Image: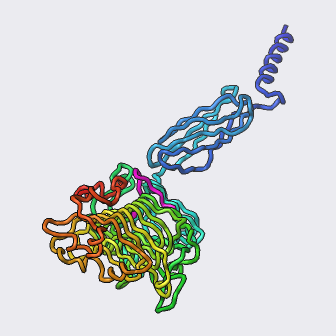
Amino acid sequence: MKILKHTVSLLIVLALFISCNDDNGNDPNPPSATAPETQNVLVGESLDLTFSISVDAGYESASVSAANGEASISSEPESGATSGDIVVSYTGNTTGAGSVELTVTDVDGLTAKATAVINVGEEQKEFTITENITEDTTWEDGKTYILGGRIIVEPDVTLTIEGGAVVKGEAGSGSNATTLLVARDATLNANGTAQAPIIFTSVADEITPEDVDNGNFGSPNLDETQNGLWGGVIVLGNAPISYSDDGNDQTEAQIEGIPTSETLALYGGNDPSDSSGSLTYVTIRHGGTNIGQGNEINGLSLGGVGNGTTIENIEIVANQDDGVEWFGGTVNVSNVLVWNNGDDALDTDQDWQGTVDNVVTMSPDGSSMELDGPEGSSATVSGNAHTIMNVSAYVETNGSELIDVDDNTNVNISNVVFFGLATDDSGNADNMFSSDYSEYADNTKGYTITSIDAVLPSGTALADYFPQSLVDDGEVEEVADAQSGTGADTSVFGWTWASQAGALSNVGL
């Protein structure tokens, strides 16, 4: 009997031993899990965390818990697997430390835990640009970019600016004037929308991308007349120009407003169809810093820009010098609004041969249009013209010129309405058009100014403001208000600061 009892006890012990071993006779290990190294994620964005696991007894299940975020398992090994990866998706909630704890369970019910540490940070929303753009770059919607000086998009590089982005120029003058300059053979694609324009302004302007997202496009702290706080936007290309340097014809020139030491500031070439990219729904404000007498930066300067470039829906506000100035080239521009500029609203030079269509100018300190032709020997042979059409010009003249042409200006102008004429300019027609108008009108190449309307102050006549030849030819007519005659289609400017501020309706547009 004792022998039988000892035998039964031995069999029970042996059975227990066998049941606690795997098929190979080895003691099973509990599962293990290894967390990834510390990771970084932005608030509201998701991150995948990969945990490595080892499960001798066979994988059964896993669960996760998270601190300062949400976590879920996105992939895991098959049931019974002895090793593999578990991928956990984590989304951070607020700035600070976060973590994910993974619990792994094997088929025997044994568990292992591992914890991944995550740094949750805020997305950077403001960037200071101090170096030229030397590789393809995108400035994003919802972010602010500070120009720390003259920033050049270098040749063979594309700068893309998304609608809703805000670009601010630091204060600077002289050779340190802050500008964004697009060199020849570089590309600027700055394409906003009516709901999300691109805003170029001064660092003194407190406007934010959040303001733009909320539909508030005006400066919250700067008056619409404050100018000269930074430079402006300059686009250069390879289209032909007509430039003379001390009587010597040149095919390229240095753009106005940039020191001659800057070799990337040259423009001009022999490609009329050249493309510098596209600018749409762009507003440029509070600029115009100059580097010296007669060497200013315009709101938008276009030097030798070709007609492969798209430029439309542009607003210039409170630029110390001209609103838009063309230096040769062939680019066409449409839907332009210039408000409170310190000099001319539109300025053309060096045989620009494009068209600007649908323009509103309001309260320029200079002329509404200063229009020059080719230079050098080509000044006497060029038969091509640039075209200005469909313009509503609120002038508040007070002695400034409505249209300033030279004897060699090659422009055709049509469908313009002038209003806001000052009574004290009555009888001053010789000064309302430049003194070279008669030579321009006598030009044998047939350039014309036609279909001009004017809203006259009470007690004045057309001949008080316009050349007698235009009056006699019936090219100038009196209208009751700025909307009853020719002029611009102002409905396309609803996205502008000028429209939001009521400036258009204030002058009867």
Q: Quadrant of residue 423?
A: bottom left
Image location of residue 478, percent across then percent down:
23, 63
Q: What stretch is highlighted in magenta?
A: 189-200
Image location of residue 68, percent across then percent down:
47, 42
Residue 134 visible in rendering: yes
Image location of residue 6, percent across then percent down:
83, 14
Closer to us: 264 or 68? 264
Closer to us: 391 or 20? 391
Q: Does 289 appear above or below 163?
A: below
Image location of residue 365, percent across then percent down:
27, 73
Q: Which residue lies furthest to the left in this view?
A: 459
Closer to us: 116 or 342? 342
Identified at 18% across, 76% down, the residue is 427
Residue 328 inside the magenta-drawn segment: no
Residue 198 inside the magenta-drawn segment: yes
Q: Quadrant of residue 428?
A: bottom left
